[in-house]
Image (tube, helix red, strand yellow):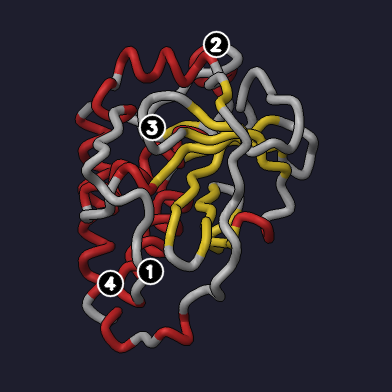
């Protein structure tokens, strides 16, 4: 836990130091407006997500009073891209099998190491601490370029759904990632929703 606090404090400190210049950015720096990913009914979460929620209930709670999407301003965009980049470069990528001896375990990278979902969960925690509504940040399961299960963080904005990923420091519109989108957390409760693209992987176990 001490290592996790140190990692988070370092990330937050670096972010605050860089945000001071964000006011000079303009709307031209923001991603173009795109169509959000459509949902097609309910879906089951991966088992490791349910286990994570049993250990970190507050990380899975949905506040219906929060907005389900954010208005993307230059300052907010600077915060989002900064946290995405800093988490990606600060954590050590390691599979759950190497790390914990199990195929899939979701955590907050409390020892400074983790795989895809751990990177994204830490990003969400830091973004929530920076003031973004957790309800607008949804953990999402995809099939990646290798045909494997992978987890990303979907930020729902007035300019479309954007993806934070540990494989790149570029925050991209969902349809430009090259991934097949399977399902994500819903924004009305703890249930997940289907994105209607393919059969869901059982685990999200790659780096």
Distance from the alpha carbon under mark 2 to that under mark 3: 15 Å
Q: Are marks 1 and 4 in contact (CB under 8 Å)?
A: no
| Any part of residue 207 in sight | no
Q: Quadrant of residue 144?
A: top right
Q: Nearer the viewer, mark 1 or mark 2?
A: 1
The residue under the point 48% across, 39% down is 92
Q: Secondary structure at mark 4?
A: helix
Spatial CA distance of label 1 from label 3 is 27 Å
Looking at the rendering, in which quadrant would you find the C terminus?
top right
Q: CA distance from mark 4 to mark 3?
A: 23 Å
Which callout, 1 or 2, points at the residue further toward the start of the chain? 1
Mark 1 vs mark 3: in front: 1
List the residue tagged with mark 1.
72
Position of residue 58 measured from the top left corner of the image (x, y, whole percent): 24, 27
Q: Of helix, strand and loop, which one carries label 2?
A: loop
Q: Decide: few, some or many residues near mark 1? Use Cα within 10 Å; few <14, some 14-19, many ≥20.
A: some
The residue carrying mark 2 is: 101
Of pointers 4 and 3, the one earlier in the residue sequence: 4
Helix, strand or loop at mark 3: loop
Give me the C-alpha separation between circle 1 and circle 4. 18 Å
Could you classify mark 2 by the number of other residues whose Cα lies within 10 Å: few (under 14), some (14-19), or many (20 or more)?
A: few
Which mark is drawn over residue 109? Answer: 3
């Amino acid at each position: 836990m001490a290592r996790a606090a140190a990692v988070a404090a370092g990330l937050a400190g670096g972010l605050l130091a860089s945000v001071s210049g964000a006011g000079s950015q303009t709307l031209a720096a923001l991603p173009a407006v795109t169509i959000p990913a459509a949902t097609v009914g309910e879906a089951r979460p991966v088992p490791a997500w349910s286990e994570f929620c049993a250990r970190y209930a507050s990380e899975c709670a949905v506040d219906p009073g929060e907005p389900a999407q954010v208005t993307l301003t230059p300052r907010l965009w600077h915060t989002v891209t900064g946290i995405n980049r800093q988490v990606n470069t600060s954590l050590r990528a390691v599979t759950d099998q190497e790390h914990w001896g199990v195929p899939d375990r979701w955590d907050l990278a409390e020892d400074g190491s983790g795989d895809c979902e751990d990177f994204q969960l830490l990003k969400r925690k830091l973004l929530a601490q920076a003031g973004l509504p957790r309800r607008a940040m949804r953990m999402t399961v995809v099939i990646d370029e290798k045909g494997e299960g992978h987890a990303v963080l979907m930020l729902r904005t007035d300019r479309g759904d954007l993806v934070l990923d540990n494989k790149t420091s570029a925050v991209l519109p969902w349809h430009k990632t090259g991934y097949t989108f399977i399902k994500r957390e819903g924004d009305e409760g703890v249930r997940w929703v289907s994105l209607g693209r393919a059969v869901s992987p059982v685990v999200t176990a790659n780096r």
